Image (cartoon, helix red, strand yellow):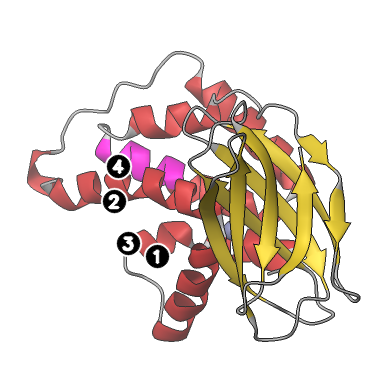
């Protein structure tokens, strides 16, 4: 899945939780969600907003929702910044703001999204390619719940399944997700494991026969 598809599909998450996507768009988005931890996390944030919206009785919405101080400027600042970088995402952001204004109760979710601190710097890891055609790079993101691997790669056999495991310091393997090869096309995959960064010693990508095609020691 390339970066552009990720941005396009991510912009559709708001419409997806509201049931506004048609069947082919749903299928494409669901396939991407299987492979993209960022979009899954975003979806998890949007679902409660949509649920709150579904419970709103339009006859009972009379008062203007209270907006936290500084939110308006934060919204505008973020939208300006987003427009400069990725136009698609600001559309998604605007959907979120519109939802929040409609429900009032949801303002907190969007405010949290808008005011979230920038992500921690990525840790780059050296990747060892063990299959001839595979070229890859990887970054790590330490989380309180485990370690995320941001894998960018090409050369995995088109249509073949691959599985990723994170190895802990005692040599135990922990699942970190799966992806499908895209031949010469680039894939960008976020893989999550339940091993804390301090416990994680490396990761391996295995083909369907269990052979290691890519490995990294942290
Ligand atoms: Zn994505």
Q: Are marks 4 and 1 in contact (CB under 8 Å)?
A: no
**The residue positioned farthest toward the top in the image shown:** 69
Total labels drawn = 4
Q: Earlier in the sequence, mark 4 or mark 1?
A: 1
Q: Percent x, y for residue 41?
A: 47, 46
Q: Residue at x 85, y 72 (%)?
A: 131
Name the quadrant of the N terminus. bottom right
Q: Which mark is residue 162?
A: none
From the viewer's perspective, tell me whether residue 35 is left or right of residue 20. Answer: right
Quarter of the rendered image showing ligand 1: bottom right
As drawn, which residue projects farthest toward the right?
Answer: 132
From the image, state whether disc 4 or disc 1 is nearer to you: 1
Task: Specify start and end residues of the magenta stretch as a single range.
Answer: 96-103
Q: At which x and y percent is residue 108?
A: 36, 27
Q: Label 4 to label 1, Cα distance in Å? A: 18 Å
Q: Secondary structure at mark 4?
A: helix
**Res 106 quadrant in image:** top left
Task: Say whether residue 19 is magenta.
Answer: no
Residues under numbered marks 3 and 2 in contact, where contact means CB atoms less than 8 Å apart: yes
Local SS, label 3: loop
Q: Name the chief secondary structure element in magenta.
A: helix
Nearest the camera: 45 or 163? 163
Q: Which residue is mark 4?
A: 102
Instruction: Residue 16: give its label.
Output: 1
Q: Is residue 215 above or below residue 31?
A: above
| Whether label 4 touches label 3, CB < 8 Å | no
Sooner in the amino-acid sequence: mark 2 or mark 4: 2
Nearer-N-terminus badge (4/3): 3
> For this rendering, which residue is in front, 169 or 190?
169
Position above or below: 66 against 24:
above
The disc placed on residue 18 is 3
């Amino acid at each position: 899945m390339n970066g552009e598809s990720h941005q396009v599909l991510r912009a559709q998450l708001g419409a997806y939780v509201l049931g506004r996507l048609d069947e082919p768009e749903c299928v494409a988005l669901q396939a991407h969600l299987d492979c993209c931890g960022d979009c899954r996390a975003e979806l998890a944030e949007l679902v409660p907003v949509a649920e709150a919206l579904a419970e709103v009785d339009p006859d009972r919405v009379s008062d203007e929702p209270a907006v936290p101080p500084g939110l308006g400027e934060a919204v505008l600042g973020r939208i300006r910044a987003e427009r400069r970088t990725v136009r698609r995402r600001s559309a998604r952001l605007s959907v979120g703001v519109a939802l929040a204004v409609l429900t009032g109760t949801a303002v907190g979710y969007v405010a949290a999204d808008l005011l979230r601190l920038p992500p921690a710097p990525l840790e780059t890891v050296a990747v060892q390619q063990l299959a001839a055609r595979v070229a890859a790079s990887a970054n790590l993101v330490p989380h309180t719940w485990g370690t995320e691997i941001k894998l960018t790669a090409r050369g995995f056999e088109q249509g073949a399944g691959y599985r990723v495991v994170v190895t802990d310091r005692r040599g135990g393997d922990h699942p970190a997700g799966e992806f499908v090869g895209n031949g010469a096309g680039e894939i960008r995959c976020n893989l999550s494991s339940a091993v804390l960064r301090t416990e994680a010693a490396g990761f391996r990508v295995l083909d369907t026969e269990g052979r290691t095609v890519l490995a990294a020691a942290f």
